[in-house]
Image (cartoon, rainbow, N blue to C red):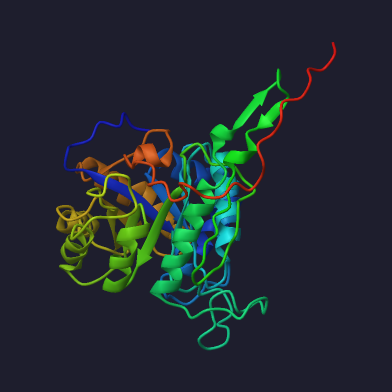
Amino acid sequence: MGDHQHPATAVHLGVGLSGQQLVALAADAELRSHVDDAAPAFVVAGVDRIDGSIPDDQTLEPTVAATFLARRAPHTAVLAAAAPHRDHPYNLARRVASADHLSRGRSGLVLGIRDGYAPRGPAGHEAWGGAGLTAGAPLGVDTTRDAAIAIEKLWQSWPYESIVADRRTRIFVRAEQIVHIDHQGVFDIAGPLTVPSTPQGSPVLAWYARTADEVEAAREVADLVILSATEPGATATAAAALSSGDSGRFADPSRRPLLFAELPHHAGDEPGVLESAVRSVSGDVDGVLVRPGRTADDLVRFVEAGLPALLAGGLVRTAPAATLRERLALPVPARLLDGARPAFPAPEPQPALRP
């Protein structure tokens, strides 16, 4: 890992990993070590699930991959790619919070509209309808936005500070601080979550945006927005949209989500192509998400050649071993549950145990 001294103009680096690359990382300790030593701000596990591409023959479920990498790649932060199309918000909130505890604050979630690996489901009822457990909901911006709000409420529903472990009173948890979220929207969820809040307060919540409508919706609910690879000039438009009004995501309403531009890296590219691409967007964005093809060999070529060129040019910064929220200098999200009804009564002190 480097000394983390970077030019002021250097942007954050994310790396988008395909299903094939996740399988390779799980099987190859040397490849994991290469990625871990490269020290990007984060990797996105299974980004091909939500980018609209044709699914690979091989993949790992992203939250499973995040949990595996939490211990096997101790410097790597992981955003798990998912969509409410396949995953109910409660399940996503629980799995990502668990990964964040295991990784000591190096986990998060990036939401998209549709999961390419999931059954399509009945028209107009695709979201969480494929399993036949509910009537489902239509895929779209409103459904993903509602899922993001519900997930954040769930992450806030069991404050970590409620765990007091007071031996004198024999009270382990101030249970009255655990609250229902009573979320009603596309998804109706009472809560609370069965996992306490994490080392970051809340895992980082991102949105993989493919349209202007998604960028606008993400401004209110996401810590960062990954802008899908688009035409020149799209990053400036997205940056303006994110800055166009107050955001409800943070306590400081003037604070906007971070913007990352997705950039492809092809093994056959001429030298300097990726560096030029980063320079072309660096004035508009806070970071870039480099997509090194889809195979394990593509990932190796990027780590061994593409990344060193970016670092040598002072274009990207590597990340110290801290929480993901600290790496990105992101504040904790605004409180969403002030005044929420307690899920449990306040515990009564108990007589001290006899020696």
Residue found at the very far right of the displayed protein: 354
Q: Nearer the viewer, residue 179 or 304?
A: 179
Q: Indicate the position of residue 169 as horizontal and vertical percent values.
A: 71, 22
The quarter in which the N terminus is drawn is top left
Q: Nearer the viewer, residue 107 or 146?
A: 146
| Number of marks in picture | 0
The quarter in which the C terminus is drawn is top right
- Relative placement, left or right, of 100 versus 130 is left
Could you tell me if residue 203 is visible in this image?
Answer: yes
Q: Indicate the position of residue 266 as horizontal and vertical percent values.
A: 33, 64
Q: Indicate the position of residue 115 as horizontal and vertical percent values.
A: 50, 72
Q: Indicate the position of residue 239 as horizontal and vertical percent values.
A: 20, 59
Where is residue 64, by image quadrant?
A: bottom right
Q: Residue at x 33, y 59 (%)?
A: 220
**Depicted 331 relative to depicted 231: above or below:** above
Q: Nearer the viewer, residue 111 or 37?
A: 111
Q: Residue at x 46, y 39 (%)?
A: 200
- Relative placement, left or right, of 347 versus 9 is right
Could you tell me if residue 211 is visible in this image?
Answer: no
Q: Residue at x 33, y 39 (%)?
A: 318
- Relative placement, left or right, of 184 versus 322 is right
Residue found at the very far bottom of the displayed protein: 123
Q: Residue at x 19, y 43 (%)?
A: 313
**Depicted 52 relative to depicted 331: above or below:** below
